[in-house]
Each structure stands twice: as structure tokens, then as C-alpha cells.
């Protein structure tokens, strides 16, 4: 399962001649060429900014939703909370079928 990732990483440290087997060893020339020919650092920074903003938005919305669905806050929130938590409990029960134990007795 990890072999494809190891293979990609190993191949990224080889020149084309090394990859084809005419030379041996490892080289950083492909990585150097990548960073000099493409704005890769800027693209990584853009991705980091987008993913960080997404996580912040999800945390804020989920926190507000959790507060709104707190059972004692608004009428009708308790059935909605129970409906959502029922699905979570059902998923947990499906992981441990009846008759199997997760603890040593």
C-alpha cells in the first residue's frame, strides 16, 4: 500500500537518465528545476490560505450549529439533536456488532 508513494518519492530524486537506468544515484536537479521553472511556493501558499480559511469557516459554522442545537436553547432543538445523535450512535454500533467485545474480560 505504501509502495506507490515510496516509488514516487524515490523517482522524484532521479534525473531522467537515472530513472531509465543508464546512470545510478540520486539527484536534486529535478526538484531544483521545479522550483526555478514554476511558482510552486506561491501555489503552495495559496493552497494553504484556502484550506486554512475553509477550516476556520467550518469550525465557526459547526460551533454555531452545535450551540443552536443544544437541547435547552430553542423549542424543537431536542428532537433535531436526537435525530442527529441517533445516526452517530448507529454508526458506532455498526462498528461493533452484537456478541463481540472490544474490551478484554
Image (cartoon, grey):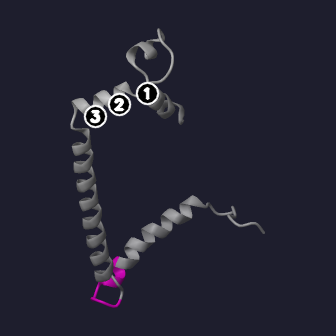
Image quarter of the N terminus: top right
Number of the label disc, if any, that sits on residue 13:
1
Of marks 1 and 3, which one's residue comes earlier in the chain? 1
Q: Which residues are magenta?
A: 72-80
**Residue picked out by circle 2:** 31
**Residue at (25, 39) in percent of width and height:** 40
Asked if marks 3 and 2 touch (Cβ < 8 Å), the reply is yes
Q: Secondary structure at mark 3?
A: helix
Q: Residue at x 27, y 45 (%)?
A: 44
| Image point (35%, 81%), residue name | 79
Residue 7 appears at what percent x and percent y? 49, 28
Q: State the residue at coordinates (28%, 53%).
A: 48
Which residue is disc 3 drawn over?
Answer: 35
- Locate residue 39: give its quadrant: top left
SS state under label 2: helix
Q: Are marks 1 and 3 in contact (CB under 8 Å)?
A: no
Residue 77, relative to residue 24: is it above or below?
below
- The numbered mark, 1 or 2, whose residue comes first in the sequence reads 1
Q: Is residue 44 above or below residue 23?
A: below
Q: In the image, residue 80 lies at what x, y percent?
A: 33, 77
Q: Position of residue 16 (x, y in %)?
A: 38, 16
Q: Secondary structure at mark 1?
A: loop
**95 in magenta:** no
Q: Is residue 72 above or below residue 94?
A: below
Q: In which quarter of the view is residue 18 placed? A: top left
Q: Nearer the viewer, residue 100 or 65?
A: 65
Mark 1 and mark 2 in contact? Answer it, CB < 8 Å: yes
Q: Residue furthest right?
A: 105
CA gap between label 1 and label 2 equals: 7 Å
Amino acid at each position: 500500500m505504501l509502495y506507490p508513494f515510496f516509488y514516487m518519492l524515490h523517482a522524484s530524486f532521479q534525473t531522467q537518465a537515472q530513472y531509465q537506468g543508464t546512470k545510478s544515484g540520486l539527484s536534486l536537479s529535478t526538484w531544483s528545476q521545479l522550483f526555478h521553472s514554476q511558482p510552486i511556493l506561491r501555489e503552495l501558499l495559496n493552497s494553504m490560505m484556502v484550506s486554512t480559511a475553509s477550516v476556520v469557516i467550518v469550525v465557526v459554522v459547526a460551533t454555531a450549529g452545535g450551540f443552536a442545537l443544544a437541547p435547552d436553547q430553542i423549542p424543537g432543538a431536542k428532537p433535531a439533536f436526537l435525530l442527529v445523535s441517533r445516526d452517530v450512535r448507529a454508526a458506532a454500533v455498526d462498528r461493533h456488532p452484537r456478541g463481540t467485545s472490544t474490551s478484554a474480560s
